[in-house]
Image: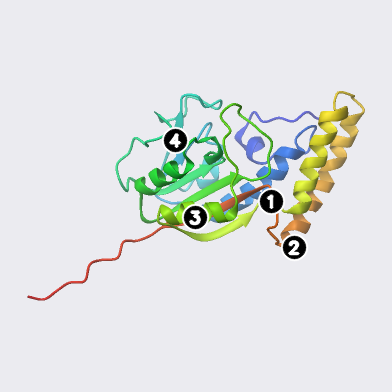
Amino acid sequence: MIRSDYTSDEAFIAPRAGLYSVPIYIHRQPLLTSARKAAAKIVGRVLDVGCGRKPYRNVFSHAVEYVGVDVASSPHLNPGIDFIYDGRILPFGDASFDSVVCTEVLEHCPDPKGILAEIARVLRPGGHLFLTVPFVYQHHEIPYDYFRFTRFGLEAMAADARLMPVWIEMRGGVYAVWVQSTYLAITYTVGRFPIVDLLYLAFWPIARLALAVDGWRKRDEITLGWQLLLQKAVEARAPQTTP
């Protein structure tokens, strides 16, 4: 049997068929598809907030500069991180970056609204943020796992930070949620028996089919998560007056 391998960035963002990787694949495949869609707008000097190992850097390889910042408690710390910060205030000046990337980070922030405001502060007017968050997902990186987000909560937080949605995409729908929940239920009940490995592999075509059907339905009654491309509002110029 093939064991799951996440040692490379490519395997991390696009898990291959193998044992135990279906729950990761069913989240990260839609995320990767959205990242590629957003790539044309993530340009110039790019900041990756909560960057970890910078797994999506190659998706945005056209960036003039790619800067990563993370907290000291991150389980994904690596020598490639450019800045360590306190999890509250980003150590950069206003409008320092043309674009920002923030993938699967807000749920680990005690004050996600504050971090979103900080991202907006360091982003230039008219610049874009590629943001992803989970909605239906088990606890992870315990104890630093605080929130899950609805579409409406995200839109409200973004509006408060003067970040306007360009597009919002679901991470699968009801069938993807069913695949993940069923897979985890099997893992928690009979996962210790080796014969179950065959069942895990059988979930791969089911997971792919679930994402395809959910993509066709496009109904957001429930989802695994969200991917958003947001744009910072351009401040209106004050009207000129003639003496």
User: What residue did someone put label 3 on?
Assistant: 156
User: What residue did someone put label 4 on?
Assistant: 68
Which element is circle 2 on? helix
User: What residue did someone put label 1 on?
Assistant: 223
Question: Which image quarter: residue 193?
Answer: top right
User: What residue did someone put label 2 on?
Assistant: 217
Residue type marked 1? Thr
Which one is nearer the viewer's eye here, 6 or 226?
226
The reply to whether dot 3 and dot 1 touch (C-beta < 8 Å) is no
Residue 1 visible within the image: no
Residue name at image x 64 percent, y 28 percent:
7
From the viewer's perspective, is residue 188 above or below residue 148? above
Residue type marked 4? Gly
Side of 243 where 10 appears, left or right: right
Residue name at image x 50 percent, y 36 percent:
109
Q: Nearer the viewer, mark 2 or mark 1?
A: 1
Disc count in the image?
Answer: 4
Residue type marked 2? Arg
Residue name at image x 29 percent, y 65 percent:
236
From the viewer's perspective, is residue 238 above or below residue 151? below
Q: CA distance from mark 4 to mark 1?
A: 28 Å
The reply to whether dot 4 and dot 1 touch (C-beta < 8 Å) is no
Please tell me how crowded label 3 is: few (under 14), some (14-19), or many (20+) other residues with Cα within 10 Å: some
**Residue 160 pos. (x, y %):** 42, 54
Residue name at image x 53 percent, y 31 percent:
53
Please tell me how crowded label 4 is: few (under 14), some (14-19), or many (20+) other residues with Cα within 10 Å: many
Q: CA distance from mark 3 to mark 1?
A: 18 Å
Side of 95 where 196 appears, left or right: right
Circle nearer the N terminus (4, 1): 4
**Residue 167 pos. (x, y %):** 55, 60
**Residue 49 pos. (x, y %):** 46, 39
